[in-house]
Amino acid sequence: MSKKLISIKGNIINFDETFSGEIIFDQKINKINKLNIKTNDFIIPGFIDLHCHGANGFDTMDGWDSIKKMTDYHLKKGTTSILPTTWTSTFEHTFNALKGFENYNKENSNILGVHLEGPFINPNKLGAQPPLAINPSVDFVKKLQDLAPIKVITLAPELDGMDYFIEEANKLGIKIQFGHSLADYDCCARFMSNYNIGFTHLYNAMSGNHHRSSGVLTAALDLGSFAEIICDFNHVSKESIKIAKKCIENLYAVTDAMGATGLKNGVYNFFNTKVEKKDKIAVLEGTNSLAGSIINMHDTFLNLKQLNFSLNDIVKMTSFNAAKYLGIDDLGYLGKNKISNILVLDKNFNLKEIYLNGIKINE
């Protein structure tokens, strides 16, 4: 790591304050000076994406080389912290995909760990997931943890054996999110009274908020403190994003980006499933069923700007809340001694500069 101090000036945006000033940093922020200057640039914390499958033709489930290439793609879109996310698959496939993961902390990487989306999900609420769902297994997770730090698991709480599994996962320091689930409100509420439960791609692939039949979505909106949400305006409407933000204090945006992100329109094969990319959406070929998103976190930021959220709230949704959810104090905020994951945007909010651990990332 270079020890030469870097200085950048602009309008500094945190979730709780905005001021013009200067940030002086190397690997960590050394000092922030408030200055009375006129500037068109905005300086914000690097984006944090806790649910991302792939990009540019590469996918987490294709192994370490693909993980590195897809996380590099998202880094160049401003995502300085990311959880490569698995699909529901066999233990052998998942284990092989995560081999080599120990290399992530030997280089200047934006990888924080892994999000397991399944396989402990409801087989009747798969969405675009492969039909390989199984009941929960602590052994499955512990063996994967020998390869990679498992930070988040998406699961369906109504499955047999979840009481024991969630208790053990909590002991391992793994965050539990409900998703791909047909659970009712009471099932969710029971776990939420004992654990800090999050929710995976809010609204999508979960039992809903019918006025006479309360499901996972109802529990999230009524009781939830944290939840992720896809803000591509395809998975969730603009109005529903606004409702979620009103109800869930620590709502944060994710991409749920899949391998077709960044590619031209066309049909692509992911896990023996044909996915068609059509401009801003990806669907299972021949259907209207969404197959994950093809958005990145910078475009997510711009979409949230369209909703007329304040820059402070957008920073909260694209960085601070996700760091808070994982309990990482030195990310998601521009302050002294915080890690120097920093973005510089121009007056139109285009990316100008990206810093990862204080090192400038070139296109």
Image: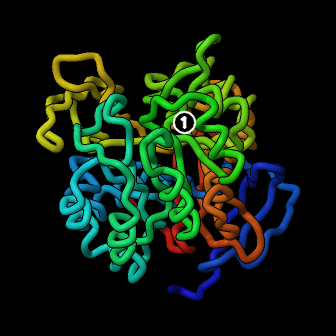
Q: Tell which of 357 and 89 is nearer to you.
A: 89
Q: Could you tell me how many numbered marks the image carries?
A: 1
- Residue 287: x %, y % from top left: 22, 17
Q: Quadrant of residue 334?
A: bottom right
Residue appearing at x 48%, y 66% in the figure: 112
Q: Where 284 falls versus 163 (above or below)?
A: above
- Residue 123: x %, y % from top left: 31, 35
Q: Tell which of 232 and 219 is nearer to you.
A: 219
Q: Is residue 54 visible?
A: no
Residue appearing at x 44%, y 65% in the figure: 150
Asked whether, in this view, residue 249 is left or right of residue 2, the answer is right
Q: Quadrant of the C terminus?
A: bottom left
Q: Disc 1 marks which amino acid?
A: Ile
Residue appearing at x 43%, y 42% in the figure: 159
Name the residue carrying label 1.
229
Residue appearing at x 52%, y 42% in the figure: 178
Q: Is residue 66 visible?
A: yes
Residue at disc 1, secondary structure: strand
Q: Where 225 falls versus 236 (above or below)?
A: below
Q: Tell which of 12 and 152 is nearer to you.
A: 152
Asked whether, in this view, residue 245 is left or right of residue 299, the answer is right
Q: Quadrant of residue 128?
A: top left
Asked whether, in this view, residue 31 is left or right of residue 107, the answer is right
Q: Residue furthest top?
A: 212
- Residue 212: x %, y % from top left: 63, 11
Tell me, what colour scheme is on the image?
rainbow
Q: Where 2 falls versus 300 (above or below)?
A: below
- Residue 74: x %, y % from top left: 40, 53
Classify 10 Å Cα crowding around label 1: few (below 14), some (14-19), many (20 and above): many
Q: Quadrant of residue 64?
A: bottom left
